Amino acid sequence: MNGVNERTNRIGWWFIGLSIIGFVVFMLYPILNSVKLVFSSISGDSSTFVGFGNFVRLFHDNVFWSSLGNSFLFLIVEVPIMLIFAIVLAVVLNSKKLKLRGFWRLLIFLPCVTSLVSYSVLFKMLFSSDGLINTFLMNTLHVISAPIPWLTDPVMAKVVIILALLWRWTGYNMIFFLAGLQNVSEEIYEAAEIDGASKVQQFLHITLPALRPIILFTAVQSTISTLQLFDEPMNITAGGPNNSSMTIAMYIYNVSFKFVPNFGYAASLSYVVMFIILILSLIQMKVAKNDD
Amino acid sequence: MTSKVSSFFKYLFIIICSFISVFPFIWMIIGSTNSSSQIIAGKMSFGDQFMNNWHHTFAQTAVVQDFWNSLKIAVLVTVLSIIVSALAAYGFQIYRSRGKNWIYSIFIASMMIPFSVLMIPLYRMMTNFGLVNNAWAVVLPSILSVFLIFFFHQSLETFPIDTIESARIDGANELKIFWSVVLPQLRSTFAAAAIYSFMGAWNNYMWPLIVLQSDDQKTLPLLISGLSATTNFSIDYGIIMVLIIISTIPIFVIFLFLQKYFVQGMTGANKG
């Protein structure tokens, strides 16, 4: 870095300047400001200092615990299924012998062009009680005799959201794995083939280890976004029935803007989410490190 | 024999997955040609309501205005965030110094902060600025994109410093070097970043829902979401199908024509 002298170093700051202003105004200030909110109770213009009162309230708040539980349920059920599908699809679509590879890739990736609101509304229509899925199961396949209450049953509502998430995000994650597979050379597989390794053994001992950093990356990314899940439950089930598909992000939104707004309490809830995200990301990175 | 069987299952698997992927799109197009009651009953053949549905959509909803609102926000966010991010990434990468590296790390760490932490202070800020129900309330906080800075930063990692050095020796000033030496080299990075940024802004839902409350400011996702809300009992699904098509078309067109950059932009990958 001999080329960069004091003067060019200073010029460098000019390039960064705008982003620093943006960061201070729209990131740093809100973060610091919400620390203040966490210890206050705010309704309208009046703000009172309540110490840890918001966190005490949180412990007795059933809706908070159930929406946190729902967010975790989506995380634990949906993310592993999605990643497994994404890996399998990537491996299949990577095989040289497959015809029309580009075409299949395009189709699998297609759900990514939809907006989250649009596809959520489509899924709500598909799964409505007199909708297409029920009509198909009842009148075409004859596997059920009465419509399944997809959106009005507490368990089924979650199932629909998980199916929707799988539809929208599997192809997206597949792209990462496809890119990762480009770094695995054909020769390793050929050598394994000669040594008599089966396809399953090759997958477990060559493909999976090679994809480990990408599995970590997609897992961390999916964890962060699933814990902030909002658009889908909001538009598919509106959190219902009876809050049974309400996520923590939806609950924070409701506490902030829908019921009698309580910004202090909502800020406390959002800090809980932030710490969960931090802890989970750190654990995932730690696990990945230890495995190496 | 076994390889034939396994290849059969491979194709079966791919065909089923592709069909599931594409089916909602087919249904969306078929649905737009049927009446509201036919759509919800799951009619899977083309009908004759296509023109009616489009007519109803333009007559009964503010689709033109909301499309324009969405487009305005998405274009502003894309242009501004790309300028700010590209300049910043260039500053961090080419003019490395201890202080700048430190700030870059703080930027990267902030990606873990969930939006809900920022939401309330930002809302109060926008109220104080008098920007509630103003498109700038959506645009301003979206200009700083740490992800885009990271994206440009990575693509500059392999940029040949020698070209910059020799331009300096030729006496070009730093901004001119950035503009005429570096920018042309990063064309595909810019395309991918633009797509990423445009899509994010076009599809943004939660924040506009909070700050754009008046009808004349609504974006397409807000229009669609509002019309299909569960409390609304007189839903015209024909209109909703048309609106979903209208909101999907711009992204779909970008995808078709710029497929390579699209995938890069969606996944933040620098290699195709």
Image: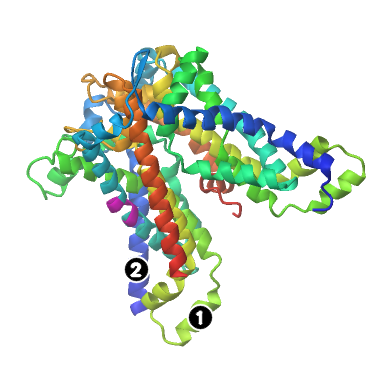
Q: Residue at x 22, y 36 (%)?
A: B42
**In which quadrant of the rendered view does residue B44 lie?**
top left
The structure residue drawn at horizontal position 56% and vertical position 36%, both measured from the top left corner, is B145
Would you identify the image quadrant in which residue A64 lies? top left
Q: Disc 2: which chain?
A: B
From the top left corner, tell me how far across and down residue A115 is, in percent. Answer: 42, 35
| Residue in the picture at 45% in, 30% down | B118
Q: Where does the magenta region start and end?
A: A76-80
Query: Residue A164's spot in the image, x, y percent?
Result: 31, 43
Q: Amino acid at mark 2?
A: Phe
Can you identify the residue that label 1 sits on? A190
Check the image and name the residue furthest to the right: B170
Residue B174 in the image: above or below residue A95: above
The kind of secondary structure element at disc 1 is helix
The residue where tag 2 is placed is B8
Q: Where residue B134 sits: x, y (%)?
A: 50, 15
Residue B205 appears in the picture as rendered: no
Q: Give how far apart the Cα atoms at labels 2 and 1 are.
A: 22 Å
Of B174 and A281, nearer the camera is A281
Q: Position of residue A35 (x, y in %)?
A: 43, 31
| Residue B234 falls left or right of residue B197 | left
Residue B156 lies in magenta, yes or no? no
Residue at the far left in the pictured view:
A145
Q: Are marks 2 and 1 on the same chain?
A: no
Which-is-in-front pick, marks 2 and 1?
Answer: 1
From the viewer's side, name the closer residue of A99 and B131.
Answer: B131
Query: Contact, CB < 8 Å: mark 2 with mark 1?
Result: no
Asked which quadrant contains residue B221, the reply is top left
Majority SS type along the magenta span:
helix
**Crowd rating for badge 1 (residues with CA inside 10 Å; few <14, some 14–19, many 20+):** few
